């Protein structure tokens, strides 16, 4: 089992969920980066964009279903701090899923390795159980993938 603990954070309460990415415009018309955009804080660490983290998470595949965790609706929220550490609020199709370590390893591989050392410096996963996962959380793309595997969704 991982060192991460289950929490009761929910997207509805706004706890640690990703806010929409927007750019502000200054009075002279120049765009300024919005929350979650790549930025270099005073510490000199380049911060990953939330959209890039979510895209990279499509490389993390549920071992039982063979569909990525994003399209299955298992990623409830993403936050990247000033030290470029990604915290993901995630759930599983079942609280009794024995594959949390596999998903954590895939997540770490997808986000922290690659050219230049990876998209983020480290990851943390908060396993959340509220709201419970259900088939309604699957994206249209995920439904298409499941149907191609013979599932009736």
Image (spheres, grey):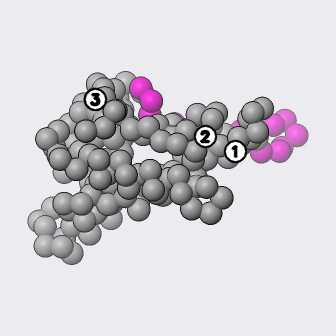
Q: Position of residue 28 (x, y in %)?
A: 88, 40
Say which mark, if any, is on residue 6.
3
Q: Position of residue 141 (x, y in %)?
A: 33, 64
Say which mark, if any, is on residue 46.
1
Neighbor class of circle 2 (other Cα within 10 Å; few <14, some 14-19, many 20+) is many
Q: Answer with left or right where residue 21 lies relative to residue 89.
A: right
Which callout, 2 or 1, points at the residue further toward the start of the chain?
1
Marks 2/1 in contact by CB < 8 Å: the verdict is yes
Q: Position of residue 5 (x, y in %)?
A: 31, 29
Q: CA distance from mark 2 to mark 3?
A: 22 Å
Marks 3/1 in contact by CB < 8 Å: the verdict is no
Say which mark, if any, is on residue 84.
2
Task: For the C terminus, give its image quadrant.
Answer: bottom left
Describe the element under mark 2 as helix, strand or loop: loop
Q: How many marks?
A: 3
Question: What span is colored magenta in the figure?
Answer: 15-31
Residue 42 can be seen in this image: yes
Instruction: Tell me if residue 18 is in the magenta stretch.
Output: yes
Describe the element under mark 1 as helix, strand or loop: loop
In this view, the residue in front, 142 or 125, is 125
């Amino acid at each position: 089992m991982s060192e991460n603990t289950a929490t009761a954070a929910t997207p509805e309460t706004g706890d640690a969920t990703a806010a929409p990415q927007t750019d502000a415009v200054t009075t002279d018309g120049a765009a300024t980066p919005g929350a979650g955009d790549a930025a270099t804080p005073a510490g000199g660490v380049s911060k990953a964009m939330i959209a890039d983290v979510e895209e990279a998470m499509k490389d993390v595949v549920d071992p039982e279903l063979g569909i990525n965790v994003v399209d299955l609706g298992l990623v409830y929220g993403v936050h990247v701090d000033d030290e470029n550490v990604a915290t993901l609020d995630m759930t599983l199709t079942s609280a009794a899923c024995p594959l949390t370590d596999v998903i954590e390893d895939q997540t770490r591989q997808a986000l922290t390795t690659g050219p230049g050392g990876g998209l983020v410096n480290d990851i943390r996963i908060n396993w959340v159980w509220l709201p419970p996962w259900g088939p309604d959380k699957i994206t249209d793309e995920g439904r298409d993938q499941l149907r191609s595997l013979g599932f009736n969704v």
